[in-house]
Amino acid sequence: MRPAATVLGGFRHPVHDSQRVFRGVLDAMAHPGRVVGLDAAVATAAPLHRGTVALLLALADFETPLWLSPSACNDAVLGAIRFHCGSPIASDPSGAAFVVAATAAERPRLDTLGLGSDLYPERAATLILQVDGLGVGREIALAGPGIDGTARLAVDGLDEAFWAERHALEILFPRGLDVILVDGEAVAAVPRSTAVEA
Amino acid sequence: MTNAMREPLAGYNFAYLDEQMKRSIRRAILKAVAVPGYQVPFGSREMPLPYGWGTGGIQVTASIIGAEDVLKVIDQGADDTTNAVSIRQFFARTTGVATTERTAEATIIQTRHRIPERPLGPGQIIVYQVPIPEPLRWVEARETETRKMHALQEYGVMHVKLYEDIARFGCINTSYNYPVLVNGRYLMAPSPIPKFDNPKMDRNPALQLFGAGREKRIYAVPPFTSVKSLDFEDYPFDVQHWDHCCALCGAADSYLDEVVTDDRGGRMFVCSDTDYCGERRTAGHVGAGTPVALAAEAAE
Ligand SMILES: [Zn+2]
C-alpha cells in the first residue's frame, strides 16, 4: 500500500508563531534594509527557505492568490500551501498578491507584477524573493520612510537588473512593489516608499 | 507599576480576534506602512465594545500584540479613565500580557486624544484610535471623490478651508485633528489629538499606526518619516501655549488641562499626561500647587 503523502508541518503554535513572524516582518517593513530574523521553527520544503515558509504561513490565505516560480512549483510546496494557507495558485504572476521567487533568476520582471493603482495602491503585490545572502555581498544605499538618513543593505546573489528595475518603479509611487528579501530565516524589506541607489 | 503577565482567559482566542481576521488586518498594516499616510480599507469586525470606544485601535492592537509585549492604554493622556481602563482590562483578559502606566516601559501604547510627552523610542509602537480617518471629510463628503483627491494629491481645498479660518478668526482655528502631510505625499488626519502633539509625529523613531473601526481604515507613519502640519508662509503652524506651568510638577513644556479643584470655582492647570507628571514629581519637581482662582483671590 502506498503511504499517504506527508504534509509539511506548519507552525508548532500557530497563534503565537504567526504573531511573532508578523512582528518580525513589520519591523523589517518599518525599517527598510534592516535584516530581521524571523525566529520561526518551521520545516522547509525545498527550494523554499524557512523564512519564506514562515511568511506564507503567517500572511497567506484564501484571500491572497500566490504565484510560485518554476522550481518552487513542486508537490511538497503546493501540498503545504494548499493544506496550511489555502491560497489559490496564480498561473500568471501579475494576478498574485504574493509572488514567490525561489531565486533571483526565476523572478518575473518587476514591472509585470501587480503594482496597484493610484486609487487603490494597497492592491499592489508583495514580492518574496530568495537571495544567497543578507548582510553580505553588494551594498545598496536606501533612503525614505523608516530610515534615519541612509541605510545600507548588503545582498548577495541579486543582479544589477533587479535594482535598476526597482529604481525605475519609484516614480510610479503610490503604485509600486513591496519586496521582502529572504535568506534562510532572515528577511529584509524594501517597500515601494524606499528610494534605492540607481 | 507594571502588572505582570497572566494566563489569558480560557474560551477566547488570543487577543479576541480570530486568526483569519488578524491575518487580514496584518496584511493591511504592512501595506499601510509601505504607503505612509494612505488609508488602507480593512474588513472591520464587531468588537465587544461599542464604536467610539476605539474599536479600530483595538483591532490594530489585537493584531500586533504578542505574549511578550507590555501594553499601555491612555485616554486624554491618562491611564485611569473609564475608556483606558476598559481597553487595558480587555487585553489583560484576552491576552494575559503585562500592562503598564509607564510610557518608557511600554512596547505598545494605545491612545485616544494624546501623544505621551516623554519622547517615544525606537521599537515602540503607538496605536491611535481614530473616529474619522478622512481629513478631507469636512470639504468633501463623498468617499469616491476624496479617494480621487488623494490619488491626484489635490489638496488645495484643504488650504482654502484653513485660509477661510484665517480670514474669519485671524488665525487657523483648528486646534484638534489638525491636518498633516505625510512624507510630502498624503494628507492625513492625525486623529483628535491637540495640535500641540503634531510636532511629536514628525520623524518620530516609533512606528505610528492608526485604526478607524466604524470607517474600516488603517493607516501608518513609519519611523523617521516627515509629518508636516499644513500652514502658510505668512501664517506658520503654531501650537497651544499656556501662561501657567503645571500646578503639580511645574512642567512648562507639557499639554495642560484645566481642572476644577473645589465647588468655589477653584481651578488649576495640570499635565494631561499623568505618567509624565508623576515621573517629574518622583524626580523631585514641584509645582506652585495653589489653585489659580484661590491664588488670585489671596493676592487681592
Ligand atoms: Zn505636571
Image: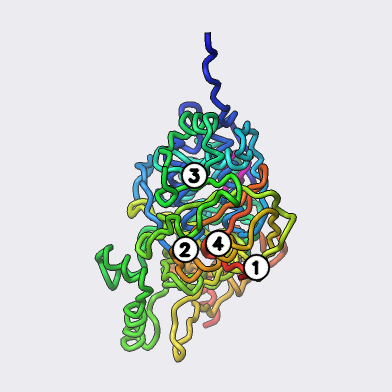
Residue placed farthest to the left in the image? B142
Furthest residue in direction top, as rendered: A1
Q: CA distance from mark 1 to mark 3?
A: 27 Å
Q: Position of residue B258 (x, y in %)?
A: 48, 68
The amino acid type found where label 1 is placed reads Asp
Which chain is disc 3 placed on?
B
Residue named by callout 1: A148
Mark 2 sits on what residue?
A: B262
User: Please, which residue is most extreme toward the right here?
Assistant: A136
- Chain holding disc 2: B
Residue type at mark 2 is Asp
First of labels 3, 4 by sequence position: 3
Residue reaching furthest bottom? B234
- Mark 1 crowdedness (10 Å alpha carbons): few <14, some 14-19, many ≥20: some
Q: Which residue is mark 4?
A: B222
Establish if B233 lies above or below A184. Answer: below
For marks 3 and 4, give the CA distance. 17 Å
**Distance of mark 1 from mark 2, alpha carbons?**
49 Å
Give the percent coordinates (x, y) of residue B131: 37, 58
Mark count: 4
Residue visible at 53% across and 12% down?
A2
Q: Which residue is mark 3?
A: B63
Considering the numbered disc 4 on the image, is that residue within a helix, a strand or a loop? loop
Q: Quadrant of residue B164?
A: bottom left
B195 to the left or right of B102 = left
Q: Is residue B155 above or below residue A104?
A: below
Decide whether residue A50 is among the magenta residues: no
| Amino acid at dot 4 | Pro
- Specify few, some or many for label 3: CA neighbours under 10 Å numbering under 14, 14-19, or 20 or more: many
| Mark found first going from the N terminus, 4 or 2 | 4
Image mark 4: chain: B
